[in-house]
Structure formats: C-alpha cells, structure tokens
Image (cartoon, rainbow, N blue to C red):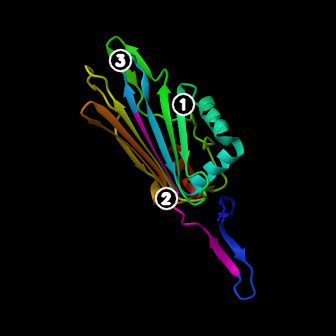
C-alpha cells in the first residue's frame, strides 16, 4: 500500500463484502548503514559510508532521487553536513521498484576531531544529516502515527593511528518505552586499536496514543 493509505482502517465497499478492513502493510522496512573511518595523527577522518534501505525507506529514497536527481540529493547532504566531503558516490538498484537500494560514498570529515596536545578527542556518533527532535511540544492532542514499523541501525568503526591508546569510550545505553512502542540501543566496544559503535532505533508499533507521547518525545 502507498504510505499515504496506511491509516489504521478503511471502509471496503463491494457487492458481497462490505465493512472496515485494516490498512496495514507487513513490508519489512529497514535502514542499515556502516561507516568505516581511519583517523590519522593530524585529526583527519577518511573512509567509506555504505547504506542499505528496504521497504518504504527505499521507496521514499527513489522518489527523492527521481525528483531531485542524484546531484540534487548529494547537494542536500552537503548542505546539511558542511563538514563532510563526498569524493565518490555510487547507487545500485535504482530502477528495480521492489528491491533494496544501496548507496556508497567515499568520505572525508573535516573538523571532526579536536587535538589537545598529545590527545585526539572526537564524538564517535556520526550522522550525515544534522537533525533535531520533531516532537518538541510539551503536550500533544493527537496520536502519533509513524505509518509502519521500521528499524534503523548504524555501525561506525574508527581505526586509531599507531602510537595512540583509547583511554575513554562512550557509555552503553538501552531504552525501551512502556508498552514496547520503540527501542533504542547504543553500544561501543574496543577491538585491538579500533572503536566500534553500534546504534539501533526501532519503531515496533507505528501508532502511539496521546498518553504515551512523553515517552516518545524523551526517547
């Protein structure tokens, strides 16, 4: 079903079968991304970004690419993330409607690392798009409708330069809302001289009643 038709239920009119029917879709919708970066002693971050979108995420991306073109899409990324240089970009499965879309970018991140004497300081949680919480109101009068269950995951790997040791890593976090509407997890680990950060955000139930709004807002 088109995303605009996912409205809980609808009235089916027919000669024999008439009544309300559920307007839901069991299409699996996921976004999986991986960023592999190498950090040098000058504080430069260079590497690869790969993202795979399925279901409605893939459908929406196809519409954006159709309307704006690849150049327009990349210009939007550059405008929202001025510290990210895209040196090479590739897309696959753009013309196959029901398949996943894979996008690949060679990237360089400027101003992502602070150098303090002999220390390199950086935030391992990276995103191409600067975003803010859309649920900023203190109160809400209507339920939230995300349209469909979905999951977004991101793995970021940092190769630390020789001669440096990792002295601090982010604290792990796992949050689940009451009634299991959504979950979020953040995990970081050190493997040899590499930091690996994994984030997963899942919307399990797309319809959130007004009474549960504060949980989603604060997630």
Point 57% across, 29% down: residue: 81
Element at label 1 = strand
Nearer to the camera, 144 or 16: 16
Examine the image and state in which quarter residue 99 appears: bottom right
| Precedes in sequence: disc 1 or disc 3 | 3
Measured Cα–Cα span from mark 1 to mark 3: 21 Å
Q: Main secondary structure of the magenta part?
A: strand
Which portion, as a residue range, is magenta? 19-36
- The quadrant of the image that shows the N terminus is bottom right
Quadrant of the image occupied by residue 45: top left
> What SS does tag 3 mark?
loop
Frontmost residue, 156 versus 147 = 156
Task: Pick out the residue farthest to the bottom.
Answer: 16
Q: Is residue 98 above or below residue 87?
A: below
Q: Residue, x 27% and y 25% (percent of image)?
A: 167
Which type of secondary structure does the marked residue at label 2 adopt? loop
- Give residue 41's mark: 3
The residue at the far top in this view is: 117
Q: Position of residue 211 (x, y in %)?
A: 57, 56
Residue 34 highlighted magenta (yes or no)? yes
Callout in the foreground (2, 3): 3
Nearer the viewer's eye, disc 1 or disc 2?
Answer: 1
Question: In terms of depth relative to the viewer, which is nearer, 53 or 139?
Answer: 53
Q: Which mark is residue 86?
A: 1
Reading the chain from its start, which is encountered first: label 2 or label 3? 3
Of the two numbered discs 1 and 3 in the rendering, the one whose residue sits closer to the viewer:
1
- The residue tagged 2 is 204
Q: Position of residue 179 (x, y in %)?
A: 47, 60
Q: Is residue 113 above or below residue 127?
A: above
- Residue 27 in the image: x percent, y percent? 54, 63
């Amino acid at each position: 079903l088109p995303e605009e038709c996912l409205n809980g239920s609808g009235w089916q009119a027919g000669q024999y079968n008439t009544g309300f029917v559920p307007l839901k879709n069991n299409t699996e919708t996921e976004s999986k991304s991986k960023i592999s970066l190498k950090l040098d002693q000058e504080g430069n971050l260079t590497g690869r970004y790969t993202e795979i979108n399925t279901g409605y995420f893939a459908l929406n991306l196809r519409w954006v690419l159709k309307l704006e073109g690849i150049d327009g899409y990349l210009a939007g990324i550059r405008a929202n993330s001025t510290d990210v240089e895209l040196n090479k970009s590739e897309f696959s499965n753009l013309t196959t409607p029901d398949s996943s879309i894979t996008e690949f970018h060679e990237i360089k991140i400027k101003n992502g690392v602070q150098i303090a004497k002999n220390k390199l300081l950086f935030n391992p949680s990276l995103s191409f798009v600067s975003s803010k919480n859309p649920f900023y109101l203190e109160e809400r009068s209507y339920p939230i409708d995300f349209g469909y269950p979905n999951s977004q995951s991101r793995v970021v790997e940092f190769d630390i330069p020789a001669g440096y040791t990792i002295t601090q890593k982010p604290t792990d976090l796992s949050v689940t809302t009451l009634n299991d509407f959504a979950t979020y997890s953040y995990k970081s680990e050190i493997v040899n001289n590499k930091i690996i950060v994994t984030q997963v955000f899942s919307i399990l139930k797309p319809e959130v009643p007004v009474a549960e709004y504060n949980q989603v807002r604060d997630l």
